[in-house]
Image: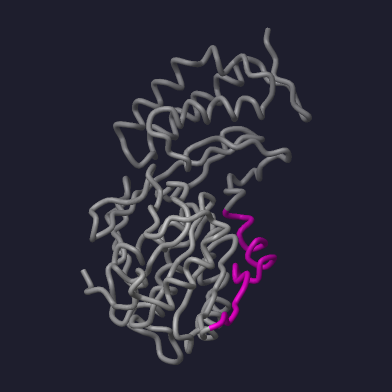
């Protein structure tokens, strides 16, 4: 009988088959696109022999992920191996770690700076954490750059984010409530996300030039903010094409050391009728990420070169 070598235990082919079956069941039930979910479930079950040849739990996670991403390349869909046993309460390790990550990164406010020409710079890294975790820090950072003549938001290392934080940020960058996107969900009603009415107090607003920096590392929530600002004509995106992950995900344990990530929704931009899944956010000014800040500074100080400083009509 083939066994699976781990630090904690060994698993029989029966146990591996149970993991594959549980993964297929959860994807079939929860993945945002039912037709793709059905195909993936069938593939997982059809390839059980290959999965049972995995020499370790980490290798099993890799082979399951390759199968899960083989149909439409959804990078939010996959299985991750964890050295330590997962919580018995079935919690999501990534979600559970967000408070620690927010504290360790000062709420994701990596850098706030005044550049020559009274250009504000706000670098967000590693994520747009929820307002509950980082709303005060983000608001303070946005108020610091409120009097800048132009603003650059650096998302080159922003790999995720919370939709409510995107809403908060956009409240400082649009002059009227603006429909950012509609979240299409498989098991719940569609939900619209709008920027709020402009908050009281200092704010950058919707008239002055704004640029957003991106890289191939920019992903998920970072892409969402860049795409919304770009498609509404509010910002010029400068840098590299982003990673191409648009689908919010949730997590399920499928074994004591394996956690499954399943996309459960898909955003639809009201301007384009689609999103950046698979394609990434295509920059308006395409340059290597390392050159993006210099290029963006030139853009926002000379709007004729592509800088955008207007408020789009709400949709």
Q: Nearer the viewer, residue 36 or 110?
A: 110
Q: In the image, which residues are magenta?
A: 95-116
Q: How many labels does the image show?
A: 0
Please identify the residue farthest to the bottom as the structure is shown.
201
Q: Nearer the viewer, residue 23 or 119?
A: 119
256 up-or-down from 138: above or below: above
Task: Give left or right: position of 60 versus 48.
Answer: right
Residue at 56% in and 82% down: 116
277 up-or-down from 224: above or below: above
The reply to whether residue 127 is visible in this rendering is: yes
Residue 251: horizontal and vertical position, in percent? 52, 44
Name the quadrant containing residue 18.
Answer: top right
Residue 145: horizontal and vertical position, in percent? 51, 83
Q: Nearer the viewer, residue 8 or 306?
A: 306
Please identify the residue farthest to the top as the structure is shown.
1
Residue 231: horizontal and vertical position, in percent? 30, 62
Name the quadrant containing residue 99.
Answer: bottom right
Task: Give left or right: position of 116 versus 305.
Answer: right
Residue at 38% in and 33% down: 72
Task: Give left or right: position of 179 versus 163.
Answer: left
The reply to whether residue 157 is visible in this rendering is: no
Residue 291: horizontal and vertical position, in percent? 55, 60
103 up-or-down from 208: above or below: above
Residue at 59% in and 15% down: 52
- Residue 290 falls within the magenta-colored stretch: no
């Amino acid at each position: 009988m083939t066994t699976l070598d781990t630090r904690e235990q060994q698993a029989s082919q029966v146990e591996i088959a149970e993991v594959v079956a549980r993964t297929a069941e959860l994807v079939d039930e929860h993945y945002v696109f039912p037709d793709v979910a059905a195909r993936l479930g069938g593939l997982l079950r059809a390839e059980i022999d290959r999965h049972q040849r995995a020499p370790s739990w980490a290798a099993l996670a890799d082979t399951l992920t390759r199968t899960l991403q083989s149909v439409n390349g959804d990078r939010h869909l996959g299985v991750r191996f964890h050295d330590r046993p997962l919580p018995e309460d079935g919690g999501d390790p990534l979600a559970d770690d967000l408070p620690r990550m927010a504290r360790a990164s000062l709420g994701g406010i990596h850098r706030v700076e005044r550049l020559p020409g009274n250009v504000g710079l706000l670098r967000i890294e590693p994520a747009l954490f929820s307002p509950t975790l980082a709303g005060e820090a983000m608001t303070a950072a946005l108020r610091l750059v409120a009097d800048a003549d132009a603003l650059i938001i650096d998302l080159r290392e922003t790999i995720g984010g919370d939709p409510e934080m995107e809403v908060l940020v956009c409240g400082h960058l649009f002059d009227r409530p603006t429909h950012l996107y509609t979240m299409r969900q498989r098991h719940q009603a569609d939900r619209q996300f709008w920027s709020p009415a402009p908050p009281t107090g200092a704010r950058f607003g919707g008239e002055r030039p704004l640029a957003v920096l991106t890289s191939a590392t920019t992903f998920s929530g970072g892409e969402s903010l860049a795409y919304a600002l770009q498609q509404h004509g509010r910002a010029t995106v400068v840098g590299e094409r982003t990673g191409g992950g648009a689908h919010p995900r949730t997590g399920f344990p499928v074994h004591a050391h394996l956690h499954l990530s399943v996309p459960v929704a898909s955003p639809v931009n009201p301007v384009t009728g689609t999103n950046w899944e698979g394609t990434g956010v295509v920059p308006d000014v395409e340059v290597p990420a390392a050159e993006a800040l210099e290029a963006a500074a030139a853009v926002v100080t000379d709007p004729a070169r592509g800088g955008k400083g207007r408020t789009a009509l709400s949709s």
